[in-house]
Amino acid sequence: MLLAVDIGNTQTALGLFDGDDLVQSWRMPTDQTFTRDEIHVRLHGYFHMYGLELAVIDAIALAGVVPMLNREWDRLAETLLADPARYVRVGRATAAVTKVEAPHPEQAGADRVANAVAAEKHYGAPAIVVDFGTATNIDVVNERGAYIGGAIAPGIRISLGALTQRAARLASIPLETPPHAIGTTTVEAVQSGTVVGAAAMAEGLVRRIKAELGAPDATVIATGGLAGVVAGSTDVFDVVDKQLTLKGICEIYRRMQARA
């Protein structure tokens, strides 16, 4: 089975695939102090919860934005895999099986490339992916299925955290879809500003991107941990797929194996 790993700045998503089928998924904190041994122990615990053994892993594919952790996963792959050729890290080594038409392809984040690959494979092109993570990334896939760029905004949790830290009378606010855009309590008002505000930002950017692409019918996909919350406040999304990035990592691995 393939273990797909998406290392974000705040959380690391893990997905165990049997072919194209996602068997199980987990999330763990992204901590730059984690060593190979710490990651190994956590993996063992996650697998044990569902009666799985690490021995079922015969391949690992990783997309990471934290260089220090990428290196620790490199070392862990050496421990877990008998065949080093069955470890793939999304980036320069996988450029031949992905399509990036941005002016500086080396600047395209591995997770954004994975999103583009998964969007084309599962939902067709052109497509627009709105990824609600540490940052809110909007990834644009043109009619040829290539990643061409997008937009990056502060993530919802970052924005809400900055607000609650700097406004003394605001306590921690649950991230939930409020019943109305007009908040009648402080909690509802903050939820409107953050959740409905994130939805409105997505609506506005998607509208402009569709106009620039000349693709009014481009498929719009929401992904990331908070995709479901934001999707409740807008009809701009055609699909909500929280595992889109992991699916893209899996597909890139399959293409690399086929090419080899």
Image (tube, rainbow, N blue to C red):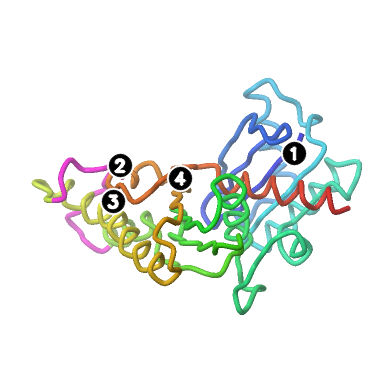
Q: Residue furthest bottom?
A: 103
**Residue at which label 1 appears:** 2
Q: Is residue 2 above or below residue 115?
A: above
Q: Which residue is mark 3?
A: 195
Instruction: Give the foreground label among 2 and 1.
Output: 2
Residue at left offset 60%, top offset 35%: 25
Q: Nearer the viewer, residue 204 or 91?
A: 204
Say which label, 2 or 1, has the lower sequence index. 1
Query: Which sits earlier in the primary sequence, circle 4 or circle 2?
Result: 4
Mark 4 — residue?
A: 225
**In this view, the mark in front (4 or 2):** 2
The alpha-carbon separation of the residues under discs 3 and 1 comes to 34 Å
Query: As shown in the figure, which amino acid type bears the numbered disc 1?
Result: Leu
The span from disc 3 to disc 2 (Cα, nearest Å) is 9 Å
Three-letter amino acid code of the residue under disc 4: Gly
Callout 3–callout 2 Cβ contact below 8 Å: yes
Please give the name of the residue rendered at 37% of the width and 54% of the height, measured from the top-left corner.
Answer: 157
| Badge 3 or badge 1: first in the primary sequence | 1
Marks 2/1: CA–CA distance: 32 Å
Residue at (60% x, 60% y) in the render: 145
Q: Secondary structure at mark 3?
A: helix
